Image: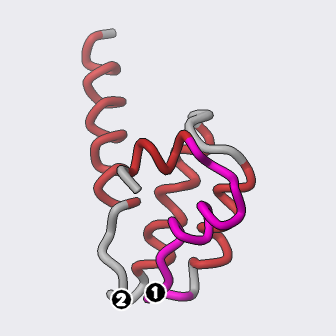
């Protein structure tokens, strides 16, 4: 039971790094979107926020955070991201 908790924490830490993948790298938008899906499935981001990551998935240079802010969705997520 304790090892499952540690595994879940390790997975969440890895996904946190992935959702913060620097802009511009090849496949970085898709990487951020996949990580955002992880947090969506955990109930940590809403569907509107996930949609922004989906739109930006093929745009490796596009920062989803300003778009999330402009749309007025994911305020808790923006706070968590320090944006």
Q: Quadrant of residue 41?
A: top right
Tag shown at residue 24: 2
Residue 56 in the image, given as x and y percentages of width and height: 59, 78
Mark 2 residue crowding within 10 angstroms, few (<14) / some (14–19) / many (20+): few
Q: Does residue 54 appear to the left or right of 47 in the view shown?
A: left
Residue 72 in the image, given as x and y percentages of width and height: 69, 56
Badge 2 element: loop
Q: Quadrant of residue 40?
A: top right
Mark 1 residue crowding within 10 angstroms, few (<14) / some (14–19) / many (20+): some
The relative height of residue 16 versus residue 61 in the rendered view (above or below) is above
The relative height of residue 15 versus residue 80 in the rendered view (above or below) is below
Q: Does residue 42 appear to the left or right of 7 in the view shown?
A: right
Residue 17 in the image, given as x and y percentages of width and height: 29, 56
Q: Quadrant of residue 8?
A: top left
- How far separated are the C-alphas under marks 2 and 1? 5 Å
Q: Does residue 12 appear to the left or right of 69 in the view shown?
A: left
Identify the image quadrant of the C terminus.
Answer: bottom left
Badge 1 element: loop
- The residue at which mark 1 appears reads as 60
Mark 2 in CB contact with mark 1 (< 8 angstroms): yes
- The residue shown at (65%, 67%) is 70
Identify the image quadrant of the N terminus.
Answer: top left
Give the magenta range.
59-75
């Amino acid at each position: 039971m304790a090892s499952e908790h540690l595994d879940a924490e390790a997975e969440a830490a890895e996904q946190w790094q992935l959702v913060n993948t620097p802009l511009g790298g090849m496949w970085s938008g898709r990487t951020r979107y996949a990580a955002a899906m992880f947090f969506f499935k955990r109930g940590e981001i809403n569907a509107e926020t996930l949609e922004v990551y989906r739109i930006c998935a093929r745009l490796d240079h596009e920062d989803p955070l300003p778009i999330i802010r402009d749309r007025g969705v994911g305020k808790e997520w923006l706070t968590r991201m320090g944006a």
